[in-house]
Amino acid sequence: MFIDYAEIELASGKGGDGAVTFRREKYVPKGGPSGGNGGKGGDIIIEAHHNLSTLLDFKYKRHYKAGKGDNGASALKDGKNGEDIIIKVPVGTIIKDSETGKIIFDLDEDNKHFIVAKGGKGGKGNSNFATPTNQTPRFAEPGIPGEEKKIILELKLIADVGLVGFPNAGKSTLISTISSAKPKIADYPFTTLEPNLGIVRYKDYQSFTVADIPGIIEGAHEGKGLGHKFLRHIERTKILLFLIDITSDNFQRDFNILYNELKSYSPKLAEKKKIISLTKIDLLEEDKLKKISKKKIKNADSPVILFSSATKQGIPELLDYLWQALKT
């Protein structure tokens, strides 16, 4: 199951208390202060890992608590630090404050990590407070409490190419054709209810990644259809490949609706390179395809590319164009 959103509660460890002790050795009846320092409380660290692809684990576990630091002891012995907790998440996960929605950190690279809740500092033992005028201090510092936080984890897929189109435009069929990804495919809208990521093997052992995003409908930026659930997944892509059904009666209108939904959701999306393709060309006669191939679409960054995932006609040319676009 693909889960791209989770809310969890964190509590880092409390620092250990400093000790109040005195040296008690044979021949030293009135030894000085010997209280050790408390150990530091455990941190909670969130780390990105390339082997993970979903936030599903957080559906079942929402509370995380790091270890407490041990108290200081006699003979200047410091307490052990509390055990850290390392929470692993997929690459592309964003950490947000649950109250403000503000982004705290972006884990956009493998092994990148962030201390989201720092453990409390251990208290100083009484050995730290001896002075010429107070050689036997009978006090020490308590440990500092850890931090308690509620955070949001939000996953955004990282891909080179994001597929954009209306429901049933052929995105799932394309990604299953050009990669090893096997999304559910059927002839009705919203077959794809969650994003899919595929790796396209290109010439000479080269590759790039393609994200199959659930279909856009008019009003998606307002949350209609699958709305915000999927639009965030195309924010990180380098190129947007628009898929428009060749049987549509108005290509420009379809593109405008898709383009405006992206722009309304995030102006940055509208600035990305936009490649336009017409799908399912196996449904039309050759003479009609020649006329259509000469059409131009406003606001596009490419000539119209025609292909069929069913017959694979035009697929090599499409991949060549995407590869060159990624390199420029």
Image (spheres, rainbow, N blue to C red):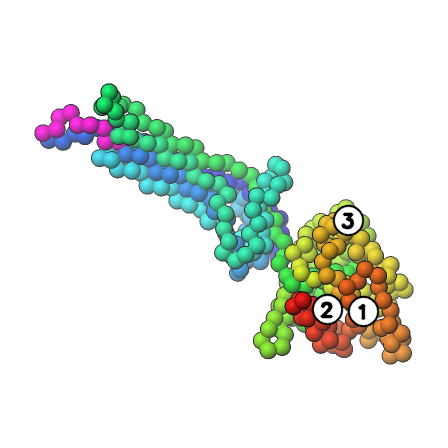
What residue sits right under mark 2 in the picture?
Answer: 173
Q: Is residue 25 above or below residue 282?
A: above
| Residue 32 painted magenta | yes
Q: CA distance from mark 2 to mark 1?
A: 19 Å
- Quarter of the picture containing the N terminus is bottom right
- Mark 3: which secondary structure? helix
Q: Quadrant of the C terminus?
A: bottom right
Give the image quarter of residue 172: bottom right
Residue drawn at point x = 77 percent, y = 67 percent: 302
Residue 92 in view (yes/no): yes
Q: Position of residue 320 (x, y in %)?
A: 70, 74
Magenta stretch encompasses residue 302: no
Residue 14, by quadrant, is top left
- The part of the chain drawn in magenta is 27-35
Q: Main secondary structure of the magenta part?
A: loop
Task: Name the residue beneath numbered marker 3.
Answer: 264
Query: Where's residue 308, x and y in %?
Result: 77, 73
Kindly identify which numbered label has been placed on residue 304: 1
Q: Earlier in the sequence, mark 2 or mark 1?
A: 2
| Foreground of the two, 9 or 146 | 146
Q: Is residue 16 above or below residue 134?
A: below
Asked which secondary structure carries label 2, the reply is helix
Spatial CA distance of label 2 from label 3 is: 27 Å
